[in-house]
Image (cartoon, rainbow, N blue to C red):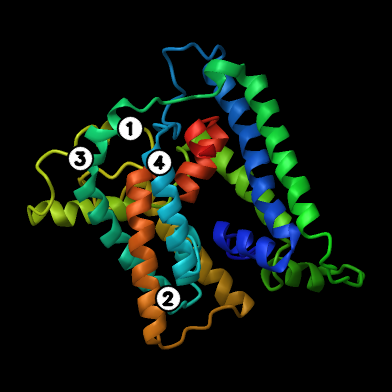
Amino acid sequence: LQRSRFCFFCHTRDLIEGGDPRVGLAILLALAVGIAGYMLVIGSWLPVPVAERLPPDAHIGPVSVVLALAAFVFGLGMAVSGSCISAHLYRLGEGSPTAPFALLGTALGFVAGFLSWNRLYLAVISEAPVVWLPHHLGYAGTLGLSLVVLGALALLALHRGRRTPLPASAAAPLDMRRAARAVFVSRWPALVGGAVVGLVSAASYLRIGPLGVTAEIGSLARSATDRLDFLPSTLYGLDGFRGCATAVKTAILSKNGVFVLGLMGASLACALVSGDFAPRRPRLSDVVAGLSGGLLMGWGARTALGCTVGVLLSGIHAGALSGWL
C-alpha cells in the first residue's frame, strides 16, 4: 500500500481529474486478480454453490438502498478527508497531519452509525436480499462476467487517459543498487501495487479471513460507548451479517487489530527507508477535514458493514453483489 500509494479515492481522483489511466487500472487489476484467487479458494471449499450455503466468512452483505446511501456518504468522506480509511492508516505511518483526526472522526462516525442502525435495520435492511452471484451464475459465470465488466471499465479508463501523454522513462542497466532503490526508495508502479493487493487479498482469505480495516476501529468505538451505556441495549441483526465485525471487545487485540497495527508499522518502516516520513504540525484545515471526512466515512462504513476494503474489495472478490453496489 505505502510503496505504490494504493488508495481507492486517490487513484480514482487522479484518473478523473488528471487523466492518468494507470492508477484506475491498478484498482481494476486488484479486483481482477483477487476475484480469480477467491474463486479458486471458494471452489475448493464449496465445489457446488448450492443455494442454502455461503462461503465461510466471506463478506457478502445485504443489498439495499441503505447500502447505496452508505457508500455515497463514505465517498463524500473520502473526498473531504483526502483518502480512504486504509490510506489514512498507512499515511499515519508517514506522519500525515490529517490521518490521526480522520481515524478519530471515523471512530465517532461508527458511534453515529450504531445510533442510527436499529431504525435503518427495521425499515429496510432486515428485508434486504443477500445476493451471492455464484448462486445464480456459477463460479465460471461469476468470474467471466466480473472480468468482462472490469475489462469494460479498463477500456473506459484508457479512453479517459488517451488525451493525457504519459511521461517516458529512460531504461537504465539494472544492478543491485538500482534494484534495491526500485524496491525500497522509488515509488512502485501502480499496476504492481494493484496486482499485489489482489494476491494478498486472496492469500489472506485462504489463511486467515477476508481483508478489512475497520473491524478493530468499530469494536473499539462500540466497546467504549457500550461501557458508557450510550448505545441502544440491542443492535438488531448487526452481529448476524457478513462483513467487518464490530463486536464488543473481549481481547486486547483481534486478528484485525494485529493486521491494522502491522499495516501502520510496515508503512512507518517503508517511509523511513524511502524518505517518505515527513511529519508536520497539523493546521486547522487538517483537523477540520480529517474529523468531518472521518465522521462521514465512519457512518458509511458502519452502515455498509465495511469500507472500500471490506465491502468493495473483499466483497467483489467473493462474488457479492453488495461489493459491486
* Mark 1 residue element: loop
Measure how far apart labels 3 and 2 are at the Cα level: 31 Å
Q: Which mark is residue 313?
A: none
The residue located at (46%, 66%) in the rendering is 88
Residue 138 appears at what percent x and percent y?
A: 60, 17
User: Which numbered disc flags the more N-terminal residue, 3 or 2?
Assistant: 2
User: Which numbered disc flags the more N-terminal residue, 3 or 1?
Assistant: 3
Amino acid beneath label 1 = Phe
**Image side of residue 145 versus residue 205, left or right:** right
The residue located at (70%, 26%) in the rendering is 144
Measure how far apart labels 2 and 1 are at the Cα level: 32 Å
* Mark 2 residue element: loop
**Image side of residue 290 versus residue 178, left or right:** left
Query: Pointer 4: what residue?
Result: 67
User: Which numbered disc flags the more N-terminal residue, 1 or 4?
Assistant: 4
Amino acid beneath label 4 = Leu
Query: Pointer 3: what residue?
Result: 118
Query: Pointer 1: what residue?
Result: 241
Query: Pointer 2: what residue?
Result: 98
